[in-house]
Image: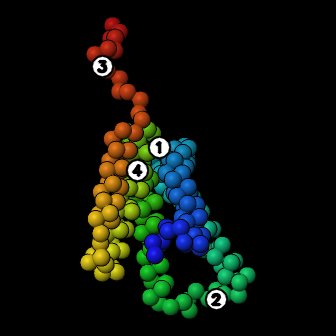
Amino acid sequence: MDALSKGDLNMQYLYYALITVVCWGTYGVCMHIGSSNMGDKENGRIMAFLWVGLAYFLTAVVAPLIILKLKGGNIAFWTFPTKGWQWSLIAGTLGAIGALGVLLAFGKMPSPAYVPVIMSIIFAGAPMVNAIVSTTKEGNWAFVKPPFIAGICMAAIGGYLITKYTPKPPKANPAKVEKKT
């Protein structure tokens, strides 16, 4: 049965996924505003990254420790299964490197109007990479149907269209600018 079929009564995963869409959809704008307001053109992005890291620490270290403690779970993380913590550490590192990449991309963009360009490249590209890597990891290429390939193509087209047509103020036309002598 399809995960999105009418018969699927347990669709809590969809609500959590939508929370993530909202959070990650506003992530880039908040990162740009934060880094732009650090008051240090040269180091503001790294200063913002430090605060992002602090937020990750509070959200991803302190909160889970409290939840595990309240639920009677194992908080001795050094006893966690090796393969589990290693892959989770890799995932966290990839996430942090990705966050740094966002900030570094912001530092190279010509104007704040390019925030949606950067984020659309990331958020259209990431699902395509995820689909390819997951399908390869699970060995499911033999079960791929045309709509899956169409979905990857549509994500690419959507990312391209958002990137190409992001609303930006028009560039000043040098021919129309009057020279003062």
Depth check, mark 1 against mark 4: the one in front is 4
Name the mark on residue 105.
none
Q: Distance between the residues labelled 3 and 4?
A: 30 Å
Q: Do the residues labelled 2 and 4 touch (CB within 8 Å)?
A: no
- The answer, for residue 41, to whether it is visible in the render is yes
Residue appearing at x 29%, y 72% in the figure: 144
Spatial separation of the CA atoms under disc 2 and disc 4? 39 Å
Q: What residue type is labelled 1?
A: Lys
Question: Of tags 3 and 1, which is closer to the observer?
Answer: 3
Contact? badges 1 and 4 (CB < 8 Å): no
Of labels 2 and 1, earlier in sequence is: 1
Q: What residue type is labelled 2?
A: Asn
- Residue 91 position within the rendered picture, expressed as x and y whole percent measured from the top left: 44, 74
- Residue type, mark 3 in image: Pro
Label at residue 174: 3
Q: Where is residue 147 in the image (x, y as percent from the top left)?
A: 32, 63
Q: Which mark is residue 74?
A: 2
Residue 97 position (above or below residue 142): above
Please say if the residues under marks 3 and 1 sit with CB atoms less than 8 Å apart: no
Amino acid type, callout 4: Ser
Look at the numbered disc 3 and give the secondary structure of its residue.
loop
What SS does tag 1 mark?
loop
Which residue position is annotated with label 4?
120
Color theme of the render? rainbow
